[in-house]
Image (tube, grey):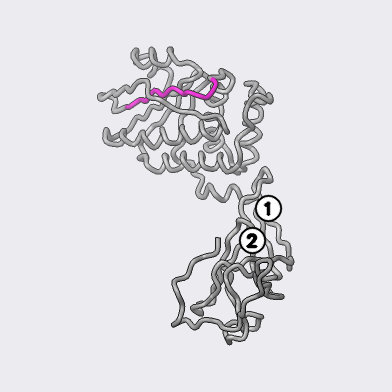
Amino acid sequence: MGADDTRERTGFSDLLADLSDRDIVIEVGTGSSSEATRIQSLRDAVEASYRALAGSVPVQLETVAVVDEVARRSLSLWLRAEAGGGDPSLLKFLARGTLAIIAWMDGSSTHQLADLQQALRVLAWGTSITTTAHPALPSSVDLVKAVTAWQQAKDTLGAQSVVRIATNNGSAQLDLSRRVEDPRALLLSRKLVNHSADMIFVVELPDYRGTGEWLLKHGEVRTTAVSEPGTLLDKFYRRELDIRPGDGLRCKVDFDTLYGPDHEVLSERYRIVEIVEVLPTAAPTGRASEDRSAIPLPGDLPELESAS
């Protein structure tokens, strides 16, 4: 929308003149009046951006006004942010940071997440939110959630739609033709593999039913291991070795770790390549170890419960 168009619309100009650092206005102009109802997806994107930028500080958006210009087939939504503590520096950063996310999505040729993070660092210094009394800059995961929300909002709008985001700190018009095809791929920065690590897994549920899958746990991480022929587990299937919930399996594993652009751990995965030994659950003090020679047949199984 040009400046002349805005000046000709007295009511809309008055609305923009009253904006503070807490406010943000979404305007959707379309070739079809029915498409204006899709403004909710844009509100969701603004909320995702504000949450990402605010970090641990709670943020809420309330509706101040809705301007429906029927003749122009335009709908404007005026939102006001309420942030914990009401810090004016943080509120200004939320508005500017949201515009920076839009500018990066529509203007970057490479869509490197590090470029967006650097732009936000510059904004943070400019709005003084980097003091110890304020939250850390947004994580890669939260930024990607915001980018995903904006892309989903773009996908709901028609090709003829015109979207403008206005704040007291600047404005931006969305380029609906620019896309981030797979926002999650922005997080995959580096993968490290630790080959043949020696680890002990706790058996949550042995493969009593012969499916080839074992439910195991390492600390708080749960995983499903597939038993291949030629390992120590062959004895379990031949009823020569008893393995029960709570027993340990000492294994050789390949340990994959995926890191994000700012070096946070995104995911970890274990691939068991060899089972070295079975470690039975220790008997309680003062009690003899029970006879564990019998392994139940699949037809004789009681109702199974996973070990806690």
Q: Provide residue 71's location: percent of width, then percent of height.
A: 25, 24
What is the three-letter code of the residue carrying label 2?
His
Mark in the foreground, 2 or 1: 2
Q: Nearer the viewer, residue 17 or 61?
A: 61
Q: Earlier in the sequence, mark 2 or mark 1?
A: 1
Q: Nearer the viewer, residue 75 or 265?
A: 265
**Residue depicted at 43% across the width and 18% down the height:** 3
The quarter in which the C terminus is drawn is bottom right
- Left or right of residue 190: residue 156: left
- Left or right of residue 3: residue 128: right
Q: Nearer the viewer, residue 224 or 81?
A: 224
**Residue depicted at 54% across the width and 73% down the height:** 213
**What residue would you read off at disc 1?**
190
The mark found on residue 218 in the picture is: 2
Quadrant housing residue 250? bottom right
- Left or right of residue 253: residue 141: left
What is the magenta range? 75-85
SS at mark 1?
strand
Q: Provide residue 189's location: percent of width, then percent of height.
A: 65, 50
Q: Provide residue 101's location: percent of width, then percent of height.
A: 54, 34
Dot 2 alpha-carbon crowd within 10 angstroms: few under 14, some 14 to 19, many 20 or more? some
- Left or right of residue 102: residue 232: right
**Residue depicted at 46% across the width and 42% down the height:** 151
What is the three-letter code of the residue carrying label 1?
Arg
The quarter in which the N terminus is drawn is top left
Disc 2 + disc 1, Cβ < 8 Å: no
SS at mark 2?
strand
* 76 magenta-colored: yes
Quadrant housing residue 244? bottom right
